[in-house]
């Protein structure tokens, strides 16, 4: 069992309180998974030609130490890349840096300078926070309730098929502004992972959901729309799943052909909310008058900006 | 504890004390423990449910319970006697393993409603999602609207009445339960077949629709779905393929 939550804001009304609305949703779904959690939050874009890089740096003990580590990393990256690199947000586990959109070059420089650093996500809009522990504590630690933006997706994990580590936590974000969270289990992920490896696409974990994320990423990279990419993923992968996937412009849900894993969608004039269980959306303003429904098996619903 | 005792003021009727339980100030355990302690025949109203799971479960005596608002999973499950009405939607597994009593939902019900229920009546005025009446063991399940895919899966005994349309694989691997559908059937599951409607069937549907309060069903026009009984035994000698 795992829990998924998502909020796609159709109007700017709640942009300033996105994190404040998402935090109790994630906390509530701690009942479906309490060993790790994560969120992808989509805000206003950084300038053209740049990406936000959500970077985790392991083994740093204090805020002060993190501050000096990140300051040094920003200076080093600026030199290495001969480009403007800034720190947008200092986090307890690392930082959000703004650097050129050349992901391979930036990632390579980060790895060289800090072998203990991991690029968790990148894109003009997205920031990804993921961690091990109770969802409520993760939200507090990362001050999620202060985040602003136009959409966010989250996941509470009860691991059933691979280890409980930060890397194994959701969301998986292997493509610019793509983030995917999954409730369920894929049965043929090892086969598909080997197939992807032959194409030069490497997973960093043995997690089944990462394979799905990399398949969607591959299709998006070929120019597919999110809906087409998800259909393709559904054709290649077997298993039980409810997926919640976001990009810089889209927000989508998909259920497997048996609809084994739950999903509730609520829509008002201001937002689309999706959660594993209705109880996780009762904290939202105006939920009493929302249109609530459950997507059918194999249905893909996409909302755009 | 948010427990308040008020008096119902229906004009002309004798005043009945109503125990009001407020989920905003009570845990689910407190709500259920309070219900369990009420004398048989009592009336209770549960408010501010906000999608909470496991409300009014495991009650083994007659109570009249009204749940105000949308509720979560397993509402009224394991009940043996209570009469429960939900003024809203419910989540998965409504009245799972009900033994006796009535559980009525005025909105829609999510997946697996009435799963494994042995007795009593489960009535949903709206739609039910997939796997409605899965492994039914003797209860009556009446859905005013549509049911999703794989409803009646492996149902062993009891009756399912669908006032609207049924989704794919209806009645897959049915045993002795009987399904009546007023609308269309997307597809039948393995070993389910359509059978001729008898006078007894019409009488059974009339009675259940009356008790459910459904006036949109013509009992003589429903479709009867029951087991073809070809999957009861594995018979290698007859070259059955599985």
Image (cartoon, coloured by chain):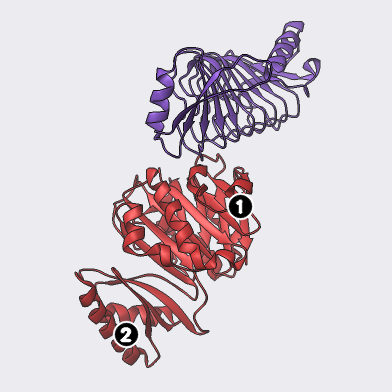
Chain colours: A red, B purple
| Badge 2: chain ID | A
- As drawn, the label of residue B133 is none
- Taking B97 as reference, is B167 left or right? right
Q: Position of residue A146 (x, y in %)?
A: 42, 66
SS class, disc 2: helix
Report the residue at 51% width, 68% height from top.
Answer: A16
Residue closer to the observer: A171 or B215: B215
Q: Which residue is mark 2?
A: A74
Is residue A158 among what the camera can see? yes
Residue closer to the observer: A76 or B208: B208
Q: Is residue B37 above or below residue A217?
A: above
- Taking A214 as reference, is A9 left or right? right
| Badge 1: chain ID | A
- Taking B27 as reference, is B154 left or right? right
Q: Quadrant of residue A251?
A: bottom right
Q: Is residue B20 above or below residue A231?
A: above
Q: Is residue A91 above or below residue B116?
A: below
Report the residue at 47% width, 18% height from top.
Answer: B79
Q: Quadrant of the N terminus of chain A?
A: top left
Q: Position of residue B138 (x, y in %)?
A: 55, 13
Q: Which residue is mark 1?
A: A300
| Label 1: how many Cα within 10 Å (few below 14, some 14–19, many 20+) | some
């Amino acid at each position: 069992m795992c829990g998924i939550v998502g909020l796609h804001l159709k109007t700017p009304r709640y942009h300033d309180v996105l994190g404040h609305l998402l935090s109790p949703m994630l906390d509530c779904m701690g009942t479906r998974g309490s060993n790790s959690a994560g969120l992808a939050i989509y805000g206003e874009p950084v300038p053209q030609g740049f990406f936000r890089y959500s970077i985790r740096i392991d083994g740093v003990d204090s805020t002060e130490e993190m501050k000096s580590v990140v300051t040094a990393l920003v200076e080093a990256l600026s030199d290495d890349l001969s480009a403007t690199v800034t720190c947008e947000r200092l986090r307890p586990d690392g930082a959000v840096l703004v650097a050129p959109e050349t992901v391979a070059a930036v990632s390579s420089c980060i790895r060289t300078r800090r072998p203990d650093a991991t690029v968790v996500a990148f894109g003009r809009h997205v920031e990804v926070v993921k961690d091990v522990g109770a969802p409520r504590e993760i939200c507090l630690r990362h001050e999620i309730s202060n985040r602003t933006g136009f959409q966010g997706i989250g996941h509470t994990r009860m691991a059933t098929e691979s280890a409980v580590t930060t890397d194994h936590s959701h969301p998986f974000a292997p493509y610019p502004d793509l983030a995917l969270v999954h409730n369920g289990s894929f049965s043929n992920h090892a086969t598909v992972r080997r197939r992807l490896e032959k194409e030069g696409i490497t997973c960093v974990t043995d997690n089944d959901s990462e394979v799905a994320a990399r398949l969607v990423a591959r299709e998006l990279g070929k120019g597919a729309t999110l809906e087409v990419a998800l259909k393709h993923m559904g054709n290649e992968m077997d298993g039980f799943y409810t997926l919640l996937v976001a990009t810089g412009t889209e927000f989508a849900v998909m259920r497997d052909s048996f609809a084994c894993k739950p999903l509730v969608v609520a829509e008002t004039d201001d937002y689309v909310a999706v959660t594993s269980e209705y109880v996780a959306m009762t904290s939202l303003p105006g939920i009493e008058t929302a249109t609530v429904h459950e997507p059918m098996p194999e249905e893909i619903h996409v909302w755009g900006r | 504890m948010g427990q308040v005792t008020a008096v119902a003021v229906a004009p002309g009727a004798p005043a009945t004390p109503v125990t009001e339980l407020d989920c905003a100030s009570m845990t689910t355990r407190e709500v259920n423990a309070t219900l369990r302690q009420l004398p048989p025949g009592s009336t209770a109203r549960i408010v501010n449910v906000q999608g909470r799971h496991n409300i009014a479960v495991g009650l083994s005596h007659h109570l009249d319970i009204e749940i105000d608002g949308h509720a979560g999973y397993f509402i009224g499950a394991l009940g043996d006697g209570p009469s429960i009405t939900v003024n809203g939607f419910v989540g998965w597994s409504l009245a799972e393993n009900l033994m006796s009593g009535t559980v009525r939902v005025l909105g829609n019900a999510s997946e697996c409603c009435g799963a494994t229920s042995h007795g009593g009546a489960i009535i949903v005025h709206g739609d039910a999602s997939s796997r409605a009446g899965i492994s039914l063991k003797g209860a009556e399940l009446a859905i005013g609207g549509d049911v999703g895919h794989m409803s009646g899966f492996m149902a062993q005994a009891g009756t399912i009445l669908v006032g609207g349309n049924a989704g794919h694989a209806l009645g897959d691997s049915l045993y002795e339960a009987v399904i009546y559908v007023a609308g269309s059937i997307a597809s039948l599951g393995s070993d389910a077949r359509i059978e001729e409607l008898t006078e007894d069937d019409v009488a059974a549907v009339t009675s259940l629709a009356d008790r459910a309060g459904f006036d949109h069903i013509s009992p003589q026009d429903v479709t009867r779905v029951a087991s073809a009984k070809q999957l009861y035994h594995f018979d290698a000698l007859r070259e059955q393929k599985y």
